[in-house]
Amino acid sequence: MVQTPRKKRSRVVANHRDPDLEEALQSTLDRGSSVWVIGDVHGYRQEFEMLLESLKISKSDMVLCVGDLVDRGADSHGTLSLVSESEQIFSLKGNHELIMSEALGGDPNREAFWLNKIGGRATLESMPGESNKEKWDNAVQWLDFTDSLPTEVVIDRFRICHSGYRVNIPLEEQSDEDRLKSREAFLATRPLDEFRQVIAGHTPVQMLSRFGIEPPEGGIWMSEVALKDGRPSVLLIDTGIVLEDPVYRPRITAYDLQTGLISEIEKIVKS
């Protein structure tokens, strides 16, 4: 029998934020424990598990993924299961969770796009079941969980969402579409939030040259625009686990909000 996602982690999130999650994250930091924010996973469950193991997470620590748990990698089902079953690992919604929902919800145009263009077929293949219908039905069961994920976390010193924000729209006026799909935060010439560091994924740091930005030689991307406290105003932590060319050193990365430490696991090359 296929185990469905646990209901306690699939409640409706009002106003795109989860106050209970934000309170837990802030309390964890206030106690001096770590909150590790992890970039796009995209179904690379094995690397995700290796990264989590490398973090040596204590019982008082928390993990927050920035979304895009699914698509392209070989085990989106295993990735979703790992997050939904954990008491310490949480996730925001990414644009791939949104597109998966649209596709599985009956939009034929999004179905074709999801399956054939952005890695949804790999997600479907990872689902339990002997037939395509069984796999499809089991994928649909995940929508209660993924549809309920918040699109933003706002705590004392950090503002976290999947893609970042638009640069010329007040933060309180931005939509889920902006928080899931925009590619502008790294172009900001002033802090998007004067008091909070913005942390996002969505755009692999190796691809920033497409936007006229110099990619980092390693690690994550940090804006040269500083907050008043000296911290970079924007961090990008998607380090391109989906990229095929090894010259980009595809990897998955975690950033500790407590200490600023960075940990990463490189993509496993299949022989």
Image (tube, helix red, strand yellow):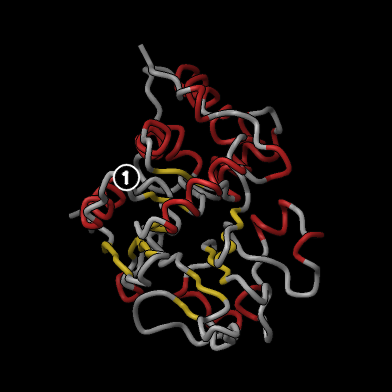
Viewer-proximal residue among 28 and 103: 28
Q: Residue at x 53, y 78 (%)?
A: 208
Image point (39%, 43%), residue name: 89
Residue at 45%, 43% (x, y): give it.
Answer: 90
Residue 126: tell me if it is visible.
no
Please state the horizontal and vertical placement of residue 149, each as a whole percent of the image.
58, 40
Disc 1: CA contacts within 10 A as few (<14), some (14-19) or many (>=20):
many
Residue 33 in the image: above or below residue 106: below
Question: Horizontally, is 1 left or right of 12 in the view?
Answer: left
Q: Nearer the viewer, residue 88 or 1?
A: 88
Q: Is residue 53 visible?
A: yes
Image quadrant where residue 226 sits? bottom right
Q: The N terminus appears in which quarter of the rendering?
A: top left
Please say if 233 is above or below 87: below
- Residue 30 sits in quarter: bottom left
Q: Is residue 96 above or below residue 51?
A: above
Tell which residue pokes out farthest to the left in this image. 271
Q: Which residue is mark 1?
A: 45
Q: Quadrant of the C terminus?
A: bottom left
Above or below residue 103? Residue 166 is below
Q: Amino acid at mark 1?
A: Arg
In the image, residue 259 lies at what x, y percent?
Answer: 35, 70
The answer to whether 25 appears left or right of 147 in the picture is: left
Q: Is residue 234 left or right of residue 84?
A: right
Residue 39 lies, in percent from the top left, at 44, 59
| Left or right, residue 30 beside residue 224 | left
**What percent of the width, then of the height, locates residue 32?**
36, 60
Between residue 269 and residue 152, name the one nearer to us. 152
- Residue under the image location 71 percent in, 38 percent down: 14
Secondary structure type for disc 1: helix
Q: Residue furthest top?
A: 1
